[in-house]
Amino acid sequence: MTLKEGQRVRLAEDLGIGEAVAGEPGAVVGFLSLGAGIEGTVEQVDGELPESHEVREYQRLKALFEDFGHTMPAASRTRLEAEIAALEPEWAAYQEQGNRMTLQVRLDNGFVLGRAHQDILTPL
């Protein structure tokens, strides 16, 4: 699903925003959330979601292995292979997600939801 600027969308799930603080410093008096079903308009398509640290590390180690693995001592190569194997589940999950975008959405209640993952929005 590709969302575009100006497109109407609906929040697909409840979204917890954070604690409400009032009175003495740090006194929590409630919790703010947006309920599923709130509608709004896409104001901006920001781009792809950033890669996690683990995904970037997998890419770095895999490139290192492919470029220099054949020249490494056996123990170093084995350790590098183990590190790559430990990060493969993160890499596989990232690959399955495909091209995920972040958006800025102005909700009808006046809130602006910035850097929102497209997965939490459905087109109208």
Image (tube, rainbow, N blue to C red):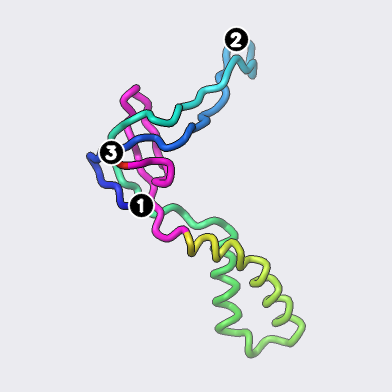
CA neighbours of label 1 inside 10 A, class few (<14), some (14 to 19), many (20+)? few
Looking at marks 3 and 2 on the same chain, the residue that comes earlier in the sequence is marked by 2
- Residue named by callout 3: 124
**Picture coordinates of residue 78, whole percent (x, y):** 73, 80
Kindly check if marks 3 and 2 are in contact, taking CB atoms under 8 A apart as contact: no
- Residue named by callout 2: 23
Tell me if residue 76 comes above or below residue 8 in the rendering.
Answer: below
For the residues marked 1 and 3, what is the alpha-carbon distance in whole angstroms?
A: 21 Å
Residue 80 figure quarter: bottom right
x 55%, y 84%: residue: 67
- Magenta segment: does it hold 89? no
**Picture coordinates of residue 21, whole percent (x, y):** 58, 17
Q: Secondary structure at mark 2?
A: loop
Residue bounds of the magenta highlight: 97-122
Amino acid type assigned to the residue bearing label 2 in the image: Gly
Amino acid type assigned to the residue bearing label 1 in the image: Gly
x 65%, y 89%: residue: 71
Q: Nearer the viewer, residue 37 or 27?
A: 37
- Residue named by callout 1: 47
Judged left or right of residue 86, residue 37 is: left
For the residues marked 2 and 1, what is the alpha-carbon distance in whole angstroms?
A: 39 Å
CA neighbours of label 2 inside 10 A, class few (<14), some (14 to 19), many (20+)? few
Point out the residue furthest to the right here: 75
Q: Secondary structure at mark 1?
A: strand
Judged left or right of residue 39, residue 53 is: right
